[in-house]
Image (cartoon, helix red, strand yellow):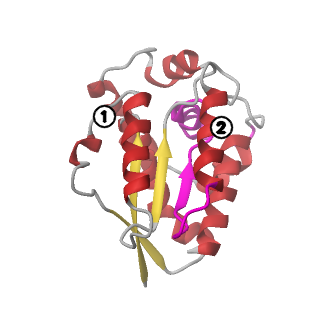
Amino acid sequence: MKVYKYVFFCEDFAHRAFIKSFLEKVPTYFGINIKFELEIPLGLENIASDHSYTEIEKSFKDYYYKTQGFNSIDLFVYGQDADSDSILEFNRLEKLYTLESIEKPLHLLFLPVKSVEHWFLYLKSNDNLLIKNSFDNLNNSTAKVLFYGNGRPTLKIRQKHIPQICSQLDIAFLAEKSESFNVFVQKTKLILEKL
């Protein structure tokens, strides 16, 4: 079994829990004999706490440029809420790091979603009759209210809801119901073909 090391730069607990669960289920979904292991590089031990998107971007940029040609990390995952007022900046960032010419290709996976709670809502509904993209266009605070019962949930509330919903992650169901998640799966597939 081939083991790939990954590091994430994520805004909060929701992103990290989702990525961990997703990467655990990827081998089964794609029918390949691999495993992903999280690596927390020296100097980034604090990535386990919540950060603003500017802190995440700075940590990512610093580490990204320091690791050109460095072989220990196979996959970089970047997750932050693509809030409606920052979606253009989010898209610019993804293009910059994906297209940039560097010595060693760094496999980079961006979460293309307003907030990961949008995807959690599909999993929570677990309804095959649900209309495609029912939740994709909700604003972030509405998605969070529907999922947590609160638009600004505390870490304690998030830690109560997220592990359970992540354990129910069904990649095929979510890809069928959410266009943004389907894009994410297709990007993951392209990266797997290059690893």
Q: Nearer the viewer, residue 69 or 45?
A: 69
User: In which image quadrant can residue 142 be found?
Assistant: top right
Specify the amino acid type for callout 2.
Asn
- Position in image of residue 32 (x %, y %): 56, 78
* Residue drawn at 64 percent across, 50 percent down: 184
Q: Residue at x 77, y 37 (%)?
A: 132
Q: Is residue 169 above or below residue 14?
A: below
Camera-side residue of 36 and 158? 36
Q: Let me know if residue 25 appears in the view.
A: yes
Task: Indicate whether 194 appears above or below 100.
Answer: below
The mark lying in front, picked from 2 and 1, is: 2
Task: State which quarter of the image contains the N terminus.
Answer: bottom left
Residue at screen point 36% across, 42% down: 59
Question: Three-letter amino acid code at disc 1?
Answer: Gln
Q: Is 88 placed above or below 175 here?
A: above
Q: Which mark is residue 145?
A: none
